[in-house]
Amino acid sequence: MRAVLTWRDKAEQCIYDLAFKPDGTQLILAAGNRLLVYDTSDGTLLQPLKGHKDTVYCVAYAKDAAAEGKRFASGSADKSIIIWTSKLEGILKYTHNDSIQCVSYNPVTHQLASCSSSDFGLWSPEQKSVSKHKSSSKITCCSWTNDGQYLALGMANGIISIRNKNGEEKVKIERPGGSLSPIWSICWNPSSRWENIWMSRENEDAEDVIVNRYFQEIPSILKSTVYSSQGSEAEEEEQEEEDDSPRDGNSEEHNDILAVADWGQKLSFYQLSGKQIGKDRPLNFDPCCISYFTKGEYILVGGSDKQVSLFTKDGVRLGTVGEQNSWVWTCRVKPDSNYVVVGCQDGTISFYQLIFSTVHGLYKDRYAYRDSMTDVIVQHLITEQKVRIKCRELVKKIAIYKNRLAIQLPEKILIYELYSDDSADMHYRVKEKIVKKFECNLLVVCADHIILCQEKRLQCLSFSGVKEREWQMESLIRYIKVIGGPAGREGLLVGLKNGQILKIFVDNLFAIVLLKQATAVRCLDMSASRNKLAVVDENDTCLVYDIHTKELLFQEPNANSVAWNTQCEDMLCFSGGGHLNIKASTFPVHQQKLQGFVVGYNGSKIFCLHVFSMSAVEVPQSAPMYQYLDRKMFKEAYQIACLGVTDADWRELAMEALEGLEFETAKKAFTRVQDLRYLELISSIEERKKRGETNNDLFLADVFSYQGKFHEAAKLYKRSGHENLALDMYTDLCMFEYAKDFLGSGDPKETRLLITKQADWARNINEPKAAVEMYISAGEHTKAIEISGSHGWVDMLIDIARKLDKAEREPLLMCASYFKKLDSPGYAAETYLKIGDLKSLVQLYVDTKRWDEAFALGEKHPEFKDDIYVPYAQWLAENDRFEEAQKAFHKAGRQGEAVRVLEQLTHNAVVESRFNDAAYYYWMLSMQCLDMAQVDPAQKDAMLEKFRHFQHLAELYHGYQTIHRYTEEPFSFDLPETLFNISKFLLHSLTKATPLGISKVLANGRNTLFTLAKQSKALGAYKLARHAYDKLRGLQIPARIQKSIELGTLTIRSKPFHDSEELVPLCYRCSTNNPLLNNLGNVCINCRQPFIFSASSYEVLHLVEFYLEEGITDEEAVALIDLEAPRHKREGKWRETSSNNILSILDQNPPDSQTLRLDETMDSIGEDDPFTAKLSFEQGSSEFVPVVVNRSVLRSMSRRDVLIKRWPPPLQWQYFRSLLPDASITMCPSCFQMFHSEDYELLVLQHACCPYCRRRIDDTSP
């Protein structure tokens, strides 16, 4: 600690008291009967204040909340108190009965306490009067507690009275000396929180230590003395006081400590409760004033020894502030500063600045420094762990080395050692004491020795205090440092003022001169390998030498301290000018801002001393690492990175090493950042190198591709002859344009492959249209079709299909398939036609129900008939179009399906009483059976049998339709003769089995019999009518016709018992009249010739069927008939016409129908007709004898007299000869049913088709 005089002045009278304005800008002095106001910055007297008539003994300034101070008070021997404003104007005055001894403002309420020889008063600005209290003795001094609750009064009789704000005494402290030791000055510690450790044991030695071990996280850069130590240490210290010093339960005692100085030459400390803290501290002089620093860490005491002494807050004397020529009556500390003002009896005013020097020591990561002048704190700079050693005396020097710590006190040196060899251990214990006073400039400790530096001399002492060795230098020693070595043989690095640098071993008397420079040494450090020496000289230049060659390697300006990196030989740092400079090898300096001095450099941590605090600054070694990288010195860069760099720096190192093909370094760096991707790359390259690959261009290309330097990688791939790898890289990265540029006008196959990959990429990123276009250009039509089809792009599909060659069958088939799915059958048909796939085209037409196109295609290509008509028929059947379905099955050759459909249709028609439809379906069934008989000879007989059966049923149902209509409907348009003939025909036809439907409606023949009965009665066939009514009587009759039947049964009895002869049927072969009721059925009872009925009126037609003689074919017979042999008696009588226009005026027969017409009146057939002779037969024969004609008979016939039923095989043709030329007969060419021509023409006009087979009149097919 040094006291530097800032300014000094001298008044004419004694300075009894002084006070600072709270902001520290002004100083108020009590000098004689005046107040003197000074400017504290330069000691200028601003203004003397006159107001008192006698000597001013005391002055005090009030501190408001803003710390500006608006008023101050002064007290004088004239018994008055004057209140002054900060503008130096007196505003208030009040008096006491005796001279005023002291004044003090309450720090909180601004209540003024004024004390005289006999009483004291309390005054507040808001009060009108002063509250005064008597005193038993002269009051010499007073002081308020920090919270303003209590006022301490010091008296001449040695008593201290503690009063509350109302002046009531709460505590009374009686000093041992009584009136012989008057209390001359008291002061409460101004610290807001009492930070002290008081020891209650009076016999405790100063060297005994208290070790506080604690951890605290402190930012490595922003450290200060207060922040880094006092805050946390205070808690520990209080805890120790709490453990070691008994006290009562009042927690306020720690917050208010009263310092007392009496003329018994003692310094004492008391708690608010009146309990003394520790022992009295002897002063050896009469104290006249006592004052705390603003924060309470130090105490100033002045008095009869004509000087101001500095004490710690617990009373340990530290030194002298300034010696004076007379008694010191008052001293104060400028608020919040280290400035001290002293007032003396001779009127001298001295203004000092106190400079507290840094006492510290450093070894690697352990830093020991002085705190509160009497404590030593050892700090572990890495872990931030601290330990406090309390010495109770002024710490003058500190040295630390490995596990040793040396502390120099005024009268002794203490040697400490660590409890263990643990690098993190912070617990120290006293090893040795050297009880002797030493004067030295520097102190160094080794394993077994301490080194004292005394100007030019170095002394080596053992821990017992025995001087073992001494070195005398040529010049002043400016710097000394232990550089390591075996225990007892450590080396010292010494720098002298004359520029000489020495190396000394503690066990060797002779010093070694390392080098000699022209300038004085300020700081030294040696590299880890002891090959290089860094020196900072008095010109602030950092010089680096090679120790062996004495060569100056380089020098850098603006340096105040230097340190080598303990982990890296070629790195050092130096500070200066507010900057930290880091230099690696011979590279340029890297600079960053940093306040303070560099004192150590370990790895990435730089230890920096700034003011009173040491901090470990984490400095990334990025800059030097990059300097090595620039020179491609990868191993050295890796060593620097190991000291501490960011992850980004590690990655950069790894990349640079990888590009430099320094795989070992790159692997280590990538391992540090845990980049598995690059580690896999390095591993693969190393494997390839083991297999014998030596192409570094290829390795580097792989590296560039991993780094994203694709163009560089492509160039290297090309240079190494691996263009395919470059293309693979570009395509994998979807950088197709670059790939095209790389290819240039190369192989078209490669170009197509590239476009294909580009299309794949476009497809994956959901750009299907672009993908389609690229697939097309690459010739990948299948993929283009697939995408277009899946997205429903018909336009694109048809473009593709039209551009494709018909030989590319597979993609065209795909197009057609998608056209079908996308409901574009036209395009699909176009595609199938293009490739000639007629089968698929047929299937398309079928699937899309485009039957017309299918039928047209089937006409051109009959081989697809089944593929068309079978699905068509099925579709018709599914849509309830069974008739068309049957025809379609028939056309398709699926006779079985056609028959089944017709059978179902027939059954439904019968059940639903649609007998006309049933007749038509049975006729169609018969024709289907005939077709099947043609196709399958094995079924010929069965099919022919079914043919005849179905033909018979068709005739029955065709006739019964009329009967059903007559009996069930209210109106009937049929002639009675027709109804009579039909009912008679049915009655004769149903002699054996009765088919379905007819049997139901007959129910024993009631409908047919009912019709027959009524029509027979109406036409005069009374016998037949009677028979019918008799049959009806045996049947269950519906109620609606029961009355009609009963009435008919009664009325028929009135009729003759015979039938009208006009109704009796004639056999045109034998001219026999047959009864109306014929037990044989519809055949002649005489000749057994079957009757030929009209399919409309059911009259017996004048036709006789004849058969050809054996050996005559149908073709020959037709040819013989067509010869038209001359007939003398029948010339021009009969004519057979064949009409192609059924609506002609002259002839309205259906096309191709055969008609026998009488042209003009003719006689009966002459006896010369050969056919007439063939009609003869044996009367009464029970066997039917057919008419068989030979060639001569056929030759004699006229084509106009013959009707031929031209049945297809295997049926024989049927030949009929008309015997009555006066009646015209028409035969339908389809069903071969016979009609009276007039009836047929009328029915065709009504229905536009044959009434039996429904052959349309415009149907020209056979």
Image: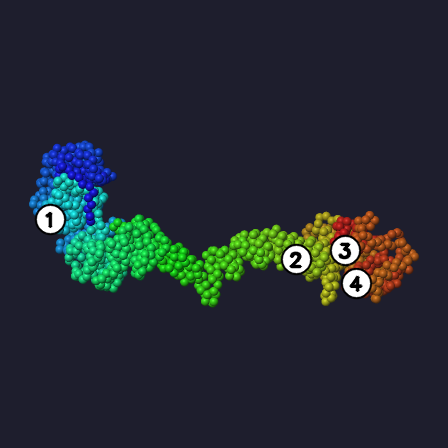
| Residue type at tag 2 | Lys
| Residue type at tag 1 | Asn
Task: Please name the residue shown 86% across and 59% down the image.
Answer: 1122
Mark 2 vs mark 3: in front: 2
Q: In this view, does 934 lie to the left or right of 451?
A: right
Q: Mark 1 points at which residue?
A: 284
Mark 1 vs mark 4: in front: 1
Q: At which x and y percent is residue 939?
A: 72, 66
Mark 4 vs mark 2, CA separation in Å: 54 Å
Q: Which sits earlier in the primary sequence, circle 2 or circle 1?
A: 1
Mark 2 vs mark 1, CA separation in Å: 128 Å
Element under disc 4: loop
Q: Which sits earlier in the primary sequence, circle 3 or circle 1?
A: 1
Mark 1 vs mark 4, CA separation in Å: 171 Å
Q: Which one is nearer the viewer's eye here, 1100 or 1047?
A: 1100
Q: Residue 1212 carries which label?
A: 4
Element under disc 3: loop
Q: Which sits earlier in the primary sequence, circle 4 or circle 2?
A: 2
Q: Which sits earlier in the primary sequence, circle 2 or circle 3?
A: 2
Q: Which one is nearer the viewer's eye here, 509 or 50?
A: 509
Quadrant that contains the C terminus = bottom right
Quadrant position of residue 555: bottom left
Q: Which sits earlier in the primary sequence, circle 1 or circle 4?
A: 1
